[in-house]
Image (tube, helix red, strand yellow):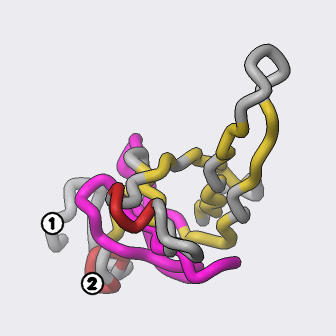
């Protein structure tokens, strides 16, 4: 993994080991983030930047769900010799530790 920055739809930074809430309000653990990649468009010959994938593991499943991010790096930083990219994932929201406490119900209220 690089020194890139990963943010949710609210622009809250996160890293591997953080908890995130997904589309259906399920809370899961960020298990890995793939490195971005590159390729060449066969028709135009232009380079293509392939964004990283975010892998989230939910307590009730053995399957890791994947989410694709996009490049949200501010334009001036993009042209640096060694840019630090910012990747945004709109399908997840970072949750604080107290949001994942066992006393939370499905509505987020205390019992």
- Residue 59, image quadrant: bottom right
- Residue 33, image quadrant: bottom right
Query: For mark 1, does the 10 Å Cα neighbourhood hold few (<14), some (14 to 19), or many (20 or more) residues?
Result: few
Query: For mark 2, does the 10 Å Cα neighbourhood hold few (<14), some (14 to 19), or many (20 or more) residues?
Result: few
Residue found at x 52% / y 64%: 28
Identify the secondary structure beneath mark 2: helix
Residue found at x 64% / y 63%: 57
**In front: 89, or 102?**
89
Work out how far the residue at label 1 is from the one at label 2, CA to CA, in angstroms: 12 Å
Whichever of labels 1 and 2 marks the residue nearer the N terminus, that label is: 2
**In front: 57, or 38?**
38
Q: Which mark is residue 25?
A: none
Assess whether residue 104 is covered by the magenta stretch: no
Count of picture labels: 2
Question: Label 1 belongs to which residue?
Answer: 109
Above or below for 5 versus 78 = below
Percent x, y of residue 96:
30, 80
The magenta stretch is 1-28
Question: Label 2 belongs to which residue?
Answer: 98
Above or below for 106 versus 86 = above
Identify the secondary structure beneath mark 1: loop
Above or below for 3 versus 87 = below
Percent x, y of residue 60:
62, 58
Assess whether residue 27 is covered by the magenta stretch: yes
Residue found at x 68% / y 45%: 50
Q: Check the picture and name the quadrant holding the N terminus.
A: bottom right
- Looking at the image, residue 52 sits to the left or right of residue 28; the answer is right
């Amino acid at each position: 993994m690089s020194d890139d920055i990963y943010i949710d739809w609210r622009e809250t930074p996160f890293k591997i080991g953080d908890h995130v809430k997904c589309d259906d309000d399920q809370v899961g653990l960020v298990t890995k983030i793939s490195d971005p990649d590159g390729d060449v468009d066969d028709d135009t010959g232009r380079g293509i930047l392939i964004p990283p994938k975010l892998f989230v593991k939910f307590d009730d499943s053995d399957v890791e769900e994947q989410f694709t991010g996009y490049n949200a790096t501010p334009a001036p930083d993009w042209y640096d010799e060694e840019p630090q990219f910012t990747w945004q994932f709109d399908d997840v929201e970072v949750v604080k530790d107290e949001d994942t406490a066992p006393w939370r119900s499905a509505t987020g209220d205390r019992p």
